Image: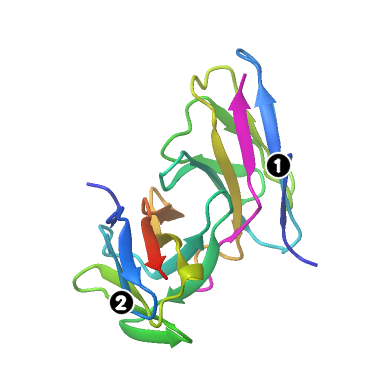
Amino acid sequence: DGGITQSPKYLFRKEGQNVTLSCEQNLNHDAMYWYRQDPGQGLRLIYYSQIVNDFQKGDIAEGYSVSREKKESFPLTVTSAQKNPTAFYLCASIKTPDGLNTEAFFGQGTRLTVV
Amino acid sequence: QKEVEQNSGPLSVPEGAIASLNCTYSDRGSQSFFWYRQYSGKSPELIMFIYSNGDKEDGRFTAQLNKASQYVSLLIRDSQPSDSATYLCAVNSWLDSSYKLIFGSGTRLLVRP
């Protein structure tokens, strides 16, 4: 079955530690996105990538980094520079962002907690 | 000004009523508009998408788009308690030389039995 897989589902981070959230899709989608969601809030864009080896900062990129070495994979690293990382992280993909078929498909999310 | 704005709610309607959810957006060049439903602790799921002015119906759901007023809405007929969730409006816009999918903050809908 095609879809987007995020792992882990739950992640605990110690102060000052870098952690990496995985996002893999087998939908052959071109574009991939990372969003952060805080309790009772909407989705805020962290980073996005429309082709391999290229990505752009979203609205809240500080303290995060990404890579897009393969079309299927778009991992997100939460660095120690991100002072308040506790949140629900969502990965999404879109087939072709410049067309009309631009509906996003989401993974199941990773809930990150600082301990 | 936020790029996509929604009333946070909660919007409370009785079972069987019509729920009306609204969204405005700032980028006139936006081409694609989406409504997602999100249950607490879960990822968003696509309910409707609309690209052209007017109405689009799918079962109990109707999306309405008015590009001149930069306004998109979602009507839910015969609301059920299972419709209680947060509804997110999303807009695909050409910004900073690339397409970005921007979400509103969501409207929480509560359907009372």
Answer yes or no: is residue A88 visible.
yes
Q: Which of A69 and B87 is in front in this view?
A: B87
Segment colored magenta: A100-115
Residue at 39%, 67% in the rendered image: B112
Residue B34 placement (x, y as % from top left):
44, 68
Compared to residue A22, the image places residue A81 above or below, namely: above
Q: Which of A31 and B34 is in front in this view?
A: B34
Residue A41 placement (x, y as % from top left):
40, 44
Residue at 59%, 53% in the rendered image: B42
For the residue marked with disc 1, what is the amino acid? Lys
Q: What element carries label 1?
A: loop
Q: In which quarter of the image is residue B21?
A: bottom left
Question: Which class describes the residues within 10 Å of circle 2: few (<14), some (14-19), or many (20+)?
Answer: many
Label 2, label 1: how far apart the Cα atoms are: 36 Å
Residue at 39%, 62% in the rendered image: B110
Residue B106 placement (x, y as % from top left):
38, 55
For the residue marked with disc 2, what is the amino acid? Leu
Mark 1 sits on what residue?
A: A9
Residue at 44%, 84% in the rendered image: B60
Quadrant, the N terminus of chain A? bottom right
Please determine if labels 2 and 1 lie on a single subunit: no
Quadrant, the C terminus of chain A? top right
